[in-house]
Image (cartoon, helix red, strand yellow):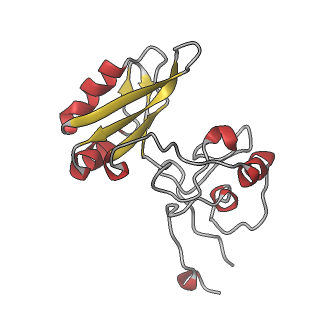
Amino acid sequence: MSRDKVHFQQYATEYDPIKIGSIDGTDTEPHDRAIERALWAQYEPDKRVTGDPRHTIFVGRLNPRTTQDTISSEFSKFGKIVKCRLVKDIVTGKSKQYAFVEFDSSSAADKAHRSMHKEYIDGCEIVVEWEAERKLSGWKPRRLGGGFGGRKEAGQLRFGGRDRPFRKPYLS
């Protein structure tokens, strides 16, 4: 089969843990235990989360000292913010180092998504991605073996997202 005939989607449009663990999205078997855990995990998006997922971005790899006010001020230059939520541990109250920012329009969210990815806030390079929980059917968070990202050293890379899009298969 020639390279031209391969149907190829660079980003995930639905969340299948086996495909997300594959560099080109064509694997049929899990290659690590986290993917197996994601396959068996039961996960339902939180019904209490409100707002428009098309206007919401995920901001990750935040400095533990970054506050919700800092996030709001950094992202407000792209448009009106409807809601900004820095996620914190319910027991300790410490930041989990990620947040969700909802804008009043998809164009403002798109500008923030394009402009802030890999920028620095409080000395840390951040990741900005579209919210996946309510947009990608089958989504599993990282704590259940899913998510995007991962470290090469751990052998648990996930593909199909912005930092690691699927790569075309190498065909001979």
Q: Position of residue 74 (x, y in %)?
A: 27, 27
| 155 and 170: which is toward the camera | 155
In which quadrant will I find the N terminus?
bottom right
Q: Residue sitting at 71 percent across and 50 percent down?
A: 38
**Image vertical order of residue 167 relative to residue 144, above or below:** below
Q: Residue at x 25, y 36 (%)?
A: 82
Q: Position of residue 102 (x, y in %)?
A: 31, 40
- Answer with left or right where residue 107 lies relative to residue 102: left
| Quadrant assignment, res 65 | top left
| Residue at horizontal 52 percent and vertical 14 percent from the top | 93
Q: Is residue 157 left or right of residue 165?
A: right
Tell me, yes or no, if residue 24 can be seen here.
yes
Quadrant where the C terminus sits is: bottom right
Q: Nearer the viewer, residue 45 or 109?
A: 45
Q: Is residue 70 above or below residue 130?
A: above
**In the image, farthest residue toward the front:** 48
| Residue 125 picture location, percent across and down | 44, 29
Q: Residue, x 79% and y 63% (percent of image)?
A: 29
Residue 151 visible in the snapshot = no
Left or right of 141 in this view: 29: right
Instruction: Compare residues 4 and 89 and report the one nearer the observer.
Output: 89
Task: Please state the total of marks drawn on the protein image.
Answer: 0
Residue 76 occupies which quadrant of the picture? top left
